[in-house]
Image (cartoon, helix red, strand yellow):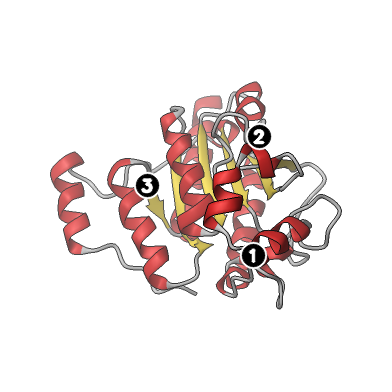
Amino acid sequence: MHRIEITEQTMRRLMGRRGKLQIYDRIEPARSALIVVDMQNCFLAPGMPAELPVGREIVPNINRLAAAFRDSGGHVVWIRNTLLPETRRSWSVWTDKILNEANREAMYREMAPGSLGHELYPDLDVRPEDAQIRKCRFSAFIQGASDLHAHLQERGIDTVVITGVATHVCCESTARDAMMLNYQTLFVSDGCAAFSDADHNGALNALIQSFCDVQDTDQVIRTLTAGVKDAAAAAE
């Protein structure tokens, strides 16, 4: 698991900007969704081309969060990164410039629908009532990447909790765009994983300053539980 560090400089900036470290101490379960980003074999299974070993360590936390969301009436969405033949044309800067040929071909092979790499990691507790959505860019919310935004809007969801891999790539991109689309956004510090502590903490320190809350799994569950209690009190 990553050694998580929010720097003193970041905390001073937060206190000066908003006077508190945590924005959300309660969220309404019925209007909230757990977004699980790219927890697929391509990133988690040993020997895969984009293997991220720490990703396997966050599986229990993601499963805990998924159970808490379901039990409270929240929604769970599993996002799968998907590369299609047309992506070579429409996202050629990434495929032709950012990746070398060997990495490019390996990613296209393992991120294609029907491949082993495209499938969700088997230790994840995926249930029939959960949603599964494909995306074709790092961010699940950027225009044309997926139908996640429409899916959430149809359900009246205004709050998202982000988990998955990689912290500083698809998770961070998705969280930034979520806030820009006016979602209350929480980012789970021990529910995301990157290739190094530096990558992970760099993303956390950037996100917490302008885009979202950063909470660990236990904090998120407490935040969700507070929302459950509020809903029960309102119904009395």
Q: How crowded is the residue under tag 1: few (<14 C-alpha within 10 Å), some, or many (20+)?
A: some
Q: Are marks 1 and 2 in contact (CB under 8 Å)?
A: no
Mark closer to the observer (1, 3): 1
Sequence order check: which comes first, mark 2 or mark 3? 2
Q: Position of residue 106 (x, y in %)?
A: 71, 64
For label 1, the residue is 103
Residue name at image x 21 percent, y 48 percent? 14
For label 3, the residue is 213
Q: Which mark is residue 75?
A: none
Residue name at image x 50 percent, y 66 percent? 194
- Figure check: 158 above or below 93: above
Q: CA distance from mark 1 to mark 2?
A: 24 Å
224, 95: nearer the viewer:
95
Classify the position of the C terminus by image quarter.
top right
Tell me: 151 left or right of 218.
right
Q: Amino acid at mark 3?
A: Asp
Q: Which mark is residue 146?
A: 2
Residue name at image x 37 percent, y 47 percent? 213
Residue name at image x 53 percent, y 32 percent? 231
Q: How crowded is the residue under tag 3: few (<14 C-alpha within 10 Å), some, or many (20+)?
A: many
Q: Position of residue 87 (x, y in %)?
A: 68, 42
Sequence order check: which comes first, mark 1 or mark 2? 1
Q: Amino acid at mark 2?
A: Ser
Q: Secondary structure at mark 2?
A: loop
Quick check: can you spot residue 127?
A: yes
